[in-house]
Amino acid sequence: MRILILFIHPRPESFCARVLGVTQAWLRDQGHEVEVADLYEEGFNPAMIAEDFAQFADEPMPDDVLREQARVDRNDAMIVITPVWWWQYPAMLKGWIDRVFSEGWAFTDSRAPNAEPIFGLRKVLVMATAGAEPARFAKYGYLEGIQTLWDTGVWGYCGVDVQTAILWAIRPFGVPEADLQPRLEEAKNVVRDFVRSLDGVQPEFISRAVRQAS
């Protein structure tokens, strides 16, 4: 299976980068083909530009957008590895969606009353790290906000079968290696269950991770 990893973090020594490492290693050990899109490292521009509005005139999109769309198209599934900053996903991820999920590629005419998604049942795992505990998210409704804005409003609108898993209470700095290993194993379990779900197996770990904040 071909799997695209969309990596969202500017620091190569971050916990997200460690999650990327174990995810790549596990997938390749299982015989999957892995492609990594490291948006910060590659210098992807997340800000909409005038040329992006070509989508509404049924004209070709900019080359960098077409490259990202081709990445998605040539893979069978996608894993997004991202932090949660200010109770939301980073601007880099939002900007990637703004530019790459264009009309005519990710969804049909948004002005039509019967607009339909194009992606169908393409599967995506969003594996996010959060500094807070589940109770903090539950107290202020942050998880529900993410699920409404992203799982329904973005992924769902484009017909994506999305699974969201949050790795809770991640400390960004000064964590002993011995304390990191169980968290990295947790991330590996999330990826394992996502891959199992691609073959029709119900992902118990992911649903449990989300339920912790409810």
Image (cartoon, helix red, strand yellow):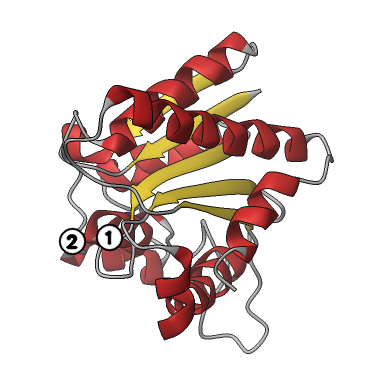
First of labels 2, 1 by sequence position? 2
Identify whether 147 is placed above or below 184. Answer: below
Identify whether 180 is placed above or below 205. Answer: above
Quadrant location of residue 120?
Answer: bottom right
Rendered residue at 48%/15% (across/down) = 25
Residue 158 place in picture, x, y as percent: 58, 64
Q: CA distance from mark 2 to mark 1?
A: 6 Å
Q: Closer to the camera, 172 or 155?
A: 172
What's under tag 2, amino acid-wise? Ala
Q: Is residue 172 left or right of residue 6?
A: left
Rendered residue at 33%/28% (across/down) = 18
Which mark, residue 36?
none
Residue 119 visible (yes or no): no
Answer whether labels 2 and 1 touch (C-beta < 8 Å).
yes
**Which residue is tagged 2?**
47
Rendered residue at 38%/64% (across/down) = 55
**Quadrant (top left/top right/bottom left/bottom right) for the N terminus:** top right
Which mark, residue 95?
1
What's under tag 1, amino acid-wise? Gly
Q: Closer to the camera, 206 or 55?
A: 206
Q: Residues within 10 Å of mark 1 (few under 14, many from 20)?
A: some
Q: Residues within 10 Å of mark 2 (few under 14, many from 20)?
A: some
Q: Closer to the camera, 125 or 69?
A: 125
Q: Is residue 77 left or right of residue 14?
A: right
Residue 163 place in picture, x, y as percent: 62, 54
Looking at the rendered structure, the secondary structure element under dot 2 is: loop
**Quadrant (top left/top right/bottom left/bottom right) for the C terminus:** bottom right
Looking at the rendered structure, the secondary structure element under dot 1 is: helix
Q: Is residue 122 left or right of residue 93?
A: right
Residue 129 visible (yes or no): yes
Residue 46 place in picture, x, y as percent: 21, 55
Residue 165 place in picture, x, y as percent: 54, 52
